[in-house]
Image (spheres, rainbow, N blue to C red):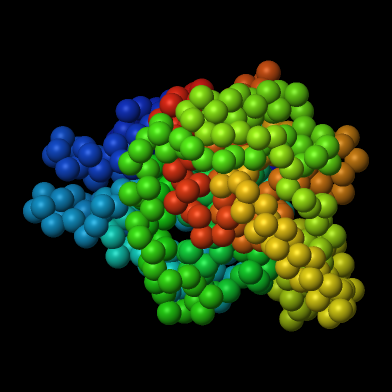
Amino acid sequence: MTPEPKTPERKTPERKTPQPTEPDALTASTAHQLIAGYERGDLSPLEAVRAVLARIDAVEPAVNAFVRVDAEQALAQAAAATERRRRGEPLGPLDGVPVTVKDLLLQAGAPTLRGSRTVRPDSRAWDEDAPAVARLREQGAVFVGRTTTPEFGWKGVTDSPLTGITRNPYDHSRTSGGSSGGSAAAVALGAAPLSIGTDGGGSVRIPASFCGIFGLKPTYGRIPLYPASPFGTLSHAGPMTRDAADAALLLDVVSGPDWRDWSQLPPTQRVSGALADGVDGVKGLRIAYSPSFGGQVAVRPAVASAVRGAVERLAELGAYIEEADPDIADPVDAFHTLWFSGAARLVQHFGTEQRELLDPGLREICAAGERASALDYLAAVDVRMELGRRMGRFHTSYDLLVTPTLPITAFEAGAEVPPGSGLRRWTGWTPFTYPFNLTQQPAATVPCGVDGDGLPIGVQLVGPRHADALVLRAAHALYASGAASVPSPGAV
């Protein structure tokens, strides 16, 4: 049984800030809104960070989104940013903006525990930033905390032997999704407007959809990664934000070059500029709408209805919509071979005692990965290449593909699959997400409504490789038209 949430590591000086139960104007703000306040001089980074820390104090006991909150460090960074802003010398647009980082990415000064009891906090110096974190630090962003992950990010929900269960902001009995579930819950609840997650099979898009926020998996290599993921070129880093405009701003920063990633893409123009057309950003686009991958996926009626509503809005905004399915069969067996092999490689040098500390489900997939041969792996690579070829051909006819992000809404917390579903692994309920990790295409989830229980629903926008700006442009049009609004999770 998965343990209940434990108290996250905290370094917190005494504060007398009020403890709200609902987001206030500051903690409900986007990064753009905070930056505008900084530039006008009617808001300081120190005020914003104090409000965010108070919000974390209020929501964390119920939701368990953080592994570590270092309030002392955050307040010191905010004070320095406030002084730079006062002098008119910000380090960049994000100077003084609160951010969180998923606990799979290195951050100097904080241990990266990866949701695992096998990682000792004193095992190394922890003096290095991952590339995305380094770019944020250069800009003066304020690191308020590190967010939860399942062990080594192996599954599509967020619970681990180390930190317990991370819960959904809309219903604490439900999962936040995963593996970037802590980041999604934190953004949804006002515990910093920006977060960096990772996505190897949907791990940004799944929790973003379940928690009613925006999530983007960019083209592979757009955000440099170091160290390389054990899951290889399936794994991407991506922005998790309150809207597409914030994600574009964040992507412009964290996609900066880093020599440690040999597979990074060359620098491109700022994607923020692609959002200037607002609601006109989709006018004339050829968009394929695939409600169920040609009947391969059973989609719940509430999800199907909300996604169709988003598609109809795209048509109203001037896109040419055609119901069309990509020519693909479910590549789950190939994905499993690659994913399970990566897990096996991750624990290859673990002894018996270390393996006993692992999440039982992770032990199972590691054992499956150990049974795969080199020929099995190469056969999975062949499937992946053919899938990429087919999607490349598909995008010669269509600028974007639209699908549900997930066929369901958030289910019981602490379970890998919906209870009673008969499914074995998390890939059974994520058929719209992991194929695009295989193909390395950019894919975003945009909130498009709620079901009868008030749980968020997401619509997925998929573009051809390197079309990150196009995906963001279409997502921003949905936000600008009011089609991407969902109710706030409210009181906690």
Report x, y in % for residue 59. Answer: 49, 35
Q: Which residue appears at 81% of the width and 56% of the height?
A: 332
Q: Quadrant of residue 437?
A: bottom right
Q: Is residue 164 visible?
A: no
> In the figure, 488 relative to 268: above or below?
above
Report x, y in % for residue 424. Answer: 87, 49
The residue nearer to you, when weighing 426 against 388, is 388
> In the figure, 176 relative to 106: above or below?
above
Q: Is residue 325 left or right of residue 280?
A: right
Figure disc tally = 0
Report x, y in % for residue 78. Answer: 26, 51
Q: Which residue appears at 76% of the width and 71% of the height?
A: 381
The residue nearer to you, when weighing 397 against 59, is 397
Q: Is residue 410 left or right of residue 250?
A: right
> In the figure, 373 relative to 107: above or below?
below
Q: Is residue 482 visible?
A: yes
Q: Which residue appears at 39% of the width and 64% of the height?
A: 268
The residue nearer to you, when weighing 46 against 357, is 46
